[in-house]
Image (cartoon, grey):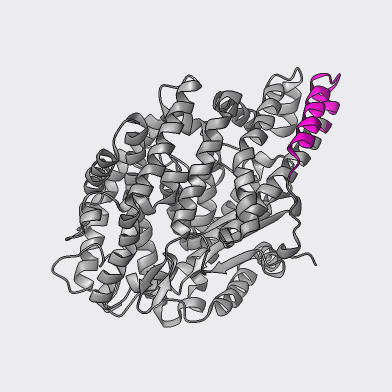
Amino acid sequence: MIRFSDYKYERPDIEKISKEFDNLLEKFENAKDVETQNEVIRQINKLRNTIDTMGTLVNIRHSINTEDEFYKKEQDFIDENEPNFQNLVFKYYKVLVNSRFRKELEGKWGSQVFNLAELQLKSFSEEIIDDLVNENRLTTEYDNLIASAKIEFEGETRNLSQMFPFIESKDRDVRKKAYEAYTNFFEENESEFDRIYDELVKVRDKMAKKLGYKNYVQFGYDRLGRTDYDSKMVANYRKQVYESLVPVVVELMDRQRKRLGLDELRYYDEPLWYLTGNATPKGSPEWILDNGKKMYKELSKETDQFFKFMVERELLDLVSKRGKMSGGYCTIIPDYNSPFIFSNFNGTSGDVGVLTHEAGHAFQSFMSMDYELPEYKFPTYEACEIHSMSMEFITWPWMELFFEDDVEKYKFSHLSDAINFIPYGTTVDEFQHFIYENPEATPEMRKSKWREIEKKYLPFRDYEDNDFLNRGGYWFKQGHIFQTPFYYIDYTLAQVCAFQFWIKDRENHEKAWEDYMRLCKAGGSLPFLELVKLGNLENPFVDGTISKVVKPLKEYLDSVDDSKL
């Protein structure tokens, strides 16, 4: 059996690929019938999959070990050349949408690929290739800066991920010191983070204006493939969050303050849920993985098959180590029909979160592998996150395997945390709209604006005497702000949908699973709001959806005597 370590990387030959691509495009344009065009589409997608496979293998191997010189160089090569590959796809989209057989092609492949192609044609041009290379270089610079963290704490050198068990310590002094040590890394590198971000904002604004956009906002939406909602709908959604959810979160944070027996809840208290300590998995990473196998075997035959595939082919890199990038992600390696899960286990409940969240993404892509179009293997981000966040809730009946006697603790904090997250995600989104509507803002103005928006959505947050956080530096740690502008509200939209799966699953597991499977199998063949409808979910943009969805969640949380946890 072939394993991830056997997956072969070969640097793509740009000249050869470009020639092959151009020949196929010529064949497409000269085609006398739709069958010929269909065959060319298949050949083009085969070529695209190979390019994507090589780029993805580099990304994965570089993120597992940023100190590996070979993959560091290959990452630079990919960053530099990815816009050239993008240009080939751009040329393909151009002939695709203008095909004389478009109607027949839409009948075969569906209209979503044409919607996405048209957005890409608006948001790409050869004249921005150098800017895209620069953008890639800057985001890799950010990733490498984050991965370079070496924090001296409790007699050892640790990276950012390895600080979290101390940030969640039951001892308030340890919590405070750990959070300060974590924050100090960002403060010590403040001018670097400011420089990287400033250059990113400027290059993105420049690209948007070159392509005829007023600013980066709509350009950013188009790059994310948002075909059925706009920034006005998102602004109205944020208003719903502010009115219907912020008061609930303020109440939950006050419950936390009382549980911890504190007069004031400070920023370094927020990560600790209970005086008796947070719920943590009761075994080693290997033990967690074994329980993951059991959970997915019992959940369904499809999840059993999927998880066996992942484990046998070693498609999970889970444990935090030196030189490894922070965070977690799921990606696809097209030529091997393989999802891949990357994470940083650190002994917190987040370790189990990865096995449910990232596995939700991986399971969806596993169920969508038969789609011939690369566009349909993953949906757009906000729809993607429904699969991951819903899987976190669908697997609740198995949480006892991981948390044993702490299972009720885990469930209470998991659900509360998911609710608490939405105003934070909304803060990130409102901040990004300000940033790209005001690209000339200075680093100081940006941080000051962050703090202002933070106070609106997170009015309980108290940074005490931490100057860096009081000045508005918290967002430096949020990679999405640097890497993929406007991809963050997606998590909150998906969370509102995932809450509906939590409600449905408690009422009727079989029906909820049926809806979930239908959603996974659809992959990216439909836009966000049509996928919402397909999953029998209510539209998060519609006024009243948030207050309706949060009601049963609040009832559940109110029924728990959290003072005893």
Residue 431 placement (x, y as % from top left):
32, 40
Residue 338 counted in the magenta span: no
Residue 129 placement (x, y as % from top left):
58, 30
What residue do we see at 19% from left, 65% from top?
Answer: 265
Magenta span: chief secondary structure: helix
What residue do we see at 45% from left, 77% from top?
Answer: 403
Residue 435 placement (x, y as % from top left):
34, 36
Q: Visible in this render: residue 101?
A: yes
Of 255 and 504, nearer the camera is: 255
Q: Quadrant of residue 26?
A: top right
Residue 142, compared with residue 343, is above or below; it is: above
- How many numbered discs sit on the rendered protein? 0
Residue 554 placement (x, y as % from top left):
31, 59
The residue sitting at the left extreme is 263
Q: Visible in this render: residue 548?
A: no
What residue do we see at 41% from left, 82% from top?
Answer: 405
Q: State the quadrant of the C terminus.
A: bottom left
Q: Left of 24 or right of it: where is 191?
A: left
Residue 554, compared with residue 75, is above or below; it is: below
Residue 13 counted in the magenta span: yes
What residue do we see at 74% from left, 42% from top?
Answer: 372
The boundaries of the magenta stretch are: 12-39
Q: State the quadrant of the N terminus.
A: bottom right
Of 358 and 242, nearer the camera is: 358
